[in-house]
């Protein structure tokens, strides 16, 4: 097993030389950080570039292992999440949770991919009944999401093939029990990395 620093060097080599993050940081900036041994900064910039470039699962696997070795747990989980997306595709949506007075949820949940609610994505059983599908949920740009709040989320379906029919603009509902827990509008659907 390679050490974290070797893995980060390998990950840089998996990106095109002109790759850049939304904030303008480039592969050249990463190489400069490697030269200065600024490993946490290197990992952070590689993640930001990866979020724009949609690289291969190999890239994300290297970053996840480097983050694990560096004991950066949330970064590790994010890289594992992105590796899963590279393998299975991406579904992003804007989720609005119902208020505490309307639903069963009374407190916020952690937004780091551990919640696995059920979703009505339009699938039906053989006898025409509603068929709910499970997907893990990652809240973008927030540590948690509470009743009555809205945020962009990423979904990791338990059975991705059952979600392939979704397209931008579709409205799906989140269920944690019988009453609807939230409503989401799909904002992006990407196929797996090829």
Image: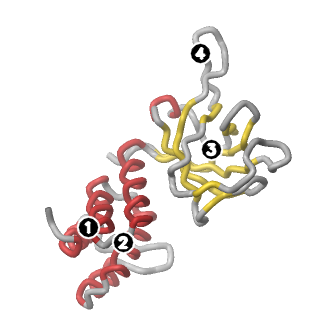
Q: CA distance from mark 3 to mark 2?
A: 28 Å
Image quadrant in which the N terminus is located: bottom left
Tell me the quarter of the picture where residue 65 sits.
bottom left
Tell me the quarter of the picture where residue 107 sits.
bottom right
Q: Could you say which disc has been placed on residue 11 in the image?
A: 1
**Relative vertical location of residue 147 with respect to residue 133 in this rendering, above or below:** below
Say if residue 188 shows up in the picture: yes
Q: Could you say which disc has been placed on residue 46 in the image?
A: 2
Residue linked to disc 3? 168
Residue linked to disc 4? 125
Query: Which of the two discs, 3 and 2, labels the residue nearer the N terminus?
Result: 2
Query: Which of the two discs, 1 and 4, labels the residue nearer the N terminus?
Result: 1
Structural crowding at the residue carrying mark 3, measured as other residues with C-alpha within 10 Å and reported as few (<14), some (14–19) or many (≥20): few
- Considering the numbered disc 4 on the image, is that residue within a helix, a strand or a loop? loop
**Relative vertical location of residue 82 with respect to residue 165 in this rendering, above or below:** below
Q: CA distance from mark 2 to mark 4?
A: 43 Å
Q: Residue at x 34, y 84 (%)?
A: 29
* Foreground pick, 153 / 67: 67
Q: Could you say which disc has been placed on residue 112 in the image?
A: none
Image colouring: secondary structure
- Considering the numbered disc 2 on the image, is that residue within a helix, a strand or a loop? helix
* Foreground pick, 66 / 186: 66
Q: Residue at x 59, y 40 (%)?
A: 117
Q: CA distance from mark 2 to mark 1?
A: 8 Å
* Foreground pick, 148 / 87: 148
């Amino acid at each position: 097993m390679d050490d974290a620093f070797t893995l980060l060097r390998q990950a840089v080599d998996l990106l095109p030389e002109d790759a850049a993050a939304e904030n303008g940081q480039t592969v050249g900036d990463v190489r400069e950080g490697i030269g200065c041994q600024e490993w946490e900064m290197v990992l952070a910039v590689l993640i930001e570039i990866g979020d724009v470039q949609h690289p291969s699962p190999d890239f994300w696997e290297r970053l996840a292992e480097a983050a694990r070795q560096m004991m950066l747990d949330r970064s590790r989980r994010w890289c594992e999440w992105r590796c899963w997306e590279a393998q299975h595709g991406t579904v992003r949506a804007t989720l609005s949770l119902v208020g505490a007075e309307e639903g069963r949820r009374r407190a916020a949940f952690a937004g780091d991919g551990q919640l696995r609610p059920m979703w009505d994505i339009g699938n039906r059983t053989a006898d025409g009944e509603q068929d709910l599908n499970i997907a893990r949920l990652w809240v973008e740009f927030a540590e948690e999401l509470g009743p009555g709040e809205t945020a962009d989320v990423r979904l990791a379906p338990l059975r991705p093939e059952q979600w392939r029919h979704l397209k931008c603009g579709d409205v799906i509902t989140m269920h944690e029990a019988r009453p609807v827990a939230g409503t989401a509008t799909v904002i992006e659907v990407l196929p797996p990395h090829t």
